[in-house]
Amino acid sequence: MSVTPRGTLDAPAADPLGAPADLTPREIVVELDRYIVGQAAAKRAVAIALRNRTRRLKLSPEMAEEVAPKNIIMIGPTGVGKTEIARRLARLTRSPFIKVEASKYTEVGYVGRDVESMVRDLADIAFERVRAEMSEQVRGRARGGVEERLLGLLLPAPVSPPLQAARSESGEGTRTDPYPRTREKLRLQLREGLFEDRVVEIEVKQEAPPALRVLGGGGLDDMDQGVRESLAGLFGGRTRRRKVTITEAREILQREEEDRLIDPDAVKRVALRRVEESGIVFIDEIDKVAGRERGHGPDVSREGVQRDLLPLVEGTSVSTRHGLVRTNHILFIASGAFHVSKPSDLIPELQGRFPIRVELQPLGVAEFVRILTEPRNALATQYRALLLTEGVEIEFTEDAVQAVAEMAARVNERSENIGARRLHTIMERLLDQVSFDAPEMTERKVVINSAYVHRMLAEIVENDDLSRYIL
């Protein structure tokens, strides 16, 4: 069975927020269809929510401030595409995106991360992305500065400037001084790569101690701003001498030159605007914090997490290391299986802030067949590309794909239903022998048909005990 990826939409011109401009809901759904099978209702919901953002930006400032995002709750079992829809939406729009799990957060006063840290993490992601974009813009200019600094390391300037100036005034410097000519010769040799293994000594910025880096990952933002600045002053300005090759020095100096050419205030300004206007927070496992208080045990802070989350969704200001972030127009997408609880178990105030609810349907045999063959990142295409790196070509026949889909659906029915993730375990087991033998195989083409699938999987699928542990 030949699997060929479908084409993509031509990327429209990017707006100042970094997102493609004026994608219609239909175009967004078409693009999501290239990667995700089914779930039309969820795709329509996120497409409309995204389009409403574009519409809001065209309003007057007074009206735009009043238009709140229409946050979404996706309801459905694991493995049906909830996370993938949100992730692909963020990639399509190039929006700052973060996926968090609601169960990892605790009420203020309990051990654990507070909910505001998700906004701080989102600001960090946006800052790094904007910085990378600006680095790309100045990369050419930075290379010129790096080349001059490398030449200075290979051939330091003469140590007696007064004598050099006197020679220049008398006219002797242009005839007898070999430094400029030697430097130009080294420049040509450097560009030809003749000095890549030469060891030089450069000054590099000293990194913060490991203890501070660990602290910065979660708790540093909770410190007073003055304390953070003091720590940055203590450890951020130190340098040390280090011996490196020209190849390593070029990478270090390239980063330094890019940092010198980039305005950090501009990076912060653009990053914060992107977070506020186009940021997406995907909160998974929201059903794990749904439910009423029981007053004891692990459930004691469930409603507290919801109440802490409420100001973020309603709109508040969160202090980050890059500045204040207003969450009024960040799009929140929550998801959960809701096997035990239900959306109505959330506190009423939080329910009202998620006006759009979409139920995703469980996947069956027909959807599994499409997942294996249709998307651009189809599983069959992935495994074929992986084994081609070993020079082995595998071909899946239509009856083989059908057999794999039927077995995945059967195992899901008999044991825990994990949706499309079951296909990964089935495919790994199916291609176990080929993947192991691929480097030494003399036969360069392997045809996977229905008989091969049943020979490799039938016994395990039919045995409930084996399938529970192996598949």
Image: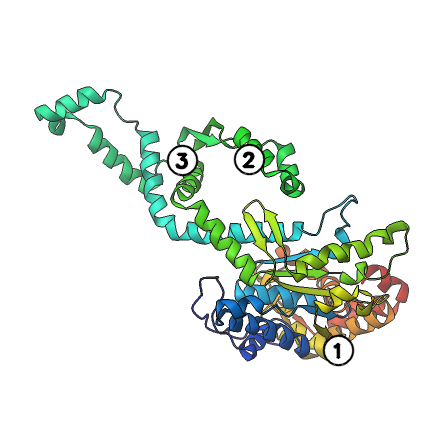
Colouring of the image: rainbow
Say which residue label 1 marks.
Answer: 365
Sequence order check, earlier mark of 2 and 3: 2
Q: Amino acid at mark 3?
A: Ile
Between 365 and 328, the one nearer to me in the picture = 328
Q: Amino acid at mark 2?
A: Glu
Say which residue label 2 marks.
Answer: 229
Figure quadrant of residue 162: top left
| Label 2 – label 1 distance at C-alpha | 57 Å
- Mark 2 vs mark 1: give the one in front: 2
Q: Amino acid at mark 1?
A: Val
Q: Is residue 167 above or below residue 457?
A: above
- Relative to residue 307, is residue 176 drawn left or right? left
Q: Residues within 10 Å of mark 3 (few under 14, many from 20)?
A: many
Sequence order check, earlier mark of 2 and 1: 2
Q: Secondary structure at mark 3?
A: helix
| Label 2 – label 3 distance at C-alpha | 34 Å
Kindly identify the residue that appears in the image at 52 percent across and 54 percent down. Answer: 272
Instruction: Report the disc number at residue 246.
Output: 3
Between 261 and 114, the one nearer to me in the picture = 114
> Residue 355, how many percent across, how many down?
70, 72
- Mark 2 vs mark 3: give the one in front: 2
Sequence order check, earlier mark of 1 and 3: 3
